[in-house]
Amino acid sequence: MPNIPLTFDEVSRQWLSEVLDAEVQDFKSEKIGEGVGLMGDIYRLELNYASDESDLPPSIVVKLPSSFEENRQQGIALGMFEAEVKFYDELGAVTGTGLPEIYFASIKSGTAQFVIVMEDLCNLTMVDQAAGMSERQALAAVRVLARIHAVWWNKVQVDELDWIPSMNGPRIEYVDQVLPEIYPAYAATFEEGLPTGGADLLQKFSKSYLKLNTSLAERAPWTLAHQDFRVENMLFGNPENDEVVVIDWQGIGRGPGVYDLAYLLGGSMEIELRRENEKALVASYHDELCSNGVEGYSFDSAWDDYGYAHLIGGLATSVFAGGTLDLSNERGKELISMMSERHVTAALDHGGVEQIPN
């Protein structure tokens, strides 16, 4: 088995030849995705081979641990690096739909030393989260999400998948402890820009995160959740076939699928577009679940669970990111302001503070 490079400097043509089982004569590389707060450093490589076999990929993407020590330590503490590698290795083939082709994935357990080599998706389209998805892109995204969820519907609460964090486990307990500590820093920068009622909502939310997760986990069916299912973690193909490829599986969890659905529509669509289309989009998600074998889950239950889920993921991401942000990062501040407004508005639209348990 190929070794795991410690840094990109150790990615050589000899190493690539071993990974791809083909002689790589030389390659060009560029770092992509910089400045987006990623947990990994990502490189795109254009390859020249000794052979002219047509089935060899002309380019690939290599993902390595972040250059920032703080990100690496967080990834280790939350088990994110190990989760992504194990997802591709152990669950990717069963999941089947909406995933990139993986050429090689390996990790030294318990460390940040990992590598993932995957297909280059440069022929697909990435959407800027600030701009938001179109109605058609949202429909394609919720359909592929439902197909992924259907594969694992009510099948994740088994010993073999204990390595995947659950929605009422240590990861959630960690965030529950941190949110009240960092909320004042978030509030100092972002609270003033929240919609009416937003500050009250987030103040109560920041003290109730574990209760909210536990409540959702008890009321909604469980599946394999991506848990960072937003538009910048997927790429869109030909509009004629509504192709969607989902990436960045390092935050996976076992829990209600509506978490992903609410996180996507709440944060990756403009507010008015979401309001106009969300009931139809939730119906399409539910229809796709049923078409792929899910039984015993009504649309009314899905709609209610979806509304409740707006009180969790998007709010936590907004507060966590805003409370720990380097305030010199102007683009970061703009993104968090946008994200906060969208997610808080969605939560208020679906009952707001009245839904938070005492």
Image (tube, rainbow, N blue to C red):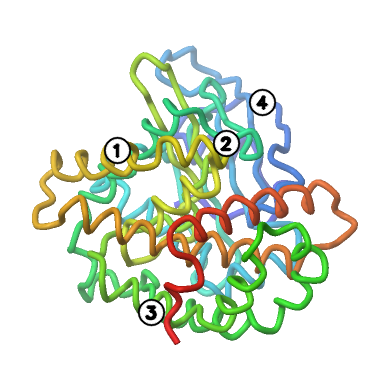
Q: Which amino acid type corresponds to the residue marked 2 in the rendered image? A: Val
The image quarter in which residue 58 lies: top right
Say which element carries label 1. Answer: loop
**Towards the viewer: 117 or 290:** 290
Q: Which amino acid type corresponds to the residue marked 3 in the rendered image? A: Asn
Q: Which amino acid type corresponds to the residue marked 4 in the rendered image? A: Asp
* Precedes in sequence: disc 4 or disc 3: 4
Give coordinates of residue 157: x percent, y percent.
22, 72
Please say if the residues under marks 2 and 3 sit with CB atoms less than 8 Å apart.
no
Q: Residue at x 85, y 53 (%)?
A: 329
Q: Which mark is residue 97?
A: 1
The answer to whether residue 100 is above or below residue 3 is above
* Precedes in sequence: disc 2 or disc 3: 2
Say which element carries label 4. Answer: strand
Mark 4–mark 3 Cα distance, whole angstroms, equals: 48 Å
Question: Which residue carries the number 2 mark?
Answer: 61
Q: Which mark is residue 26?
A: 4
Q: Which mark is residue 190?
A: none
Query: Can see residue 37?
Result: yes
Mark 2–mark 3 Cα distance, whole angstroms, equals: 34 Å
Mark 2–mark 4 Cα distance, whole angstroms, equals: 15 Å
Q: Residue at x 76, y 78 (%)?
A: 184
Mark 1–mark 2 Cα distance, whole angstroms, equals: 20 Å
* Precedes in sequence: disc 4 or disc 1: 4
Q: Residue at x 41, y 36 (%)?
A: 277
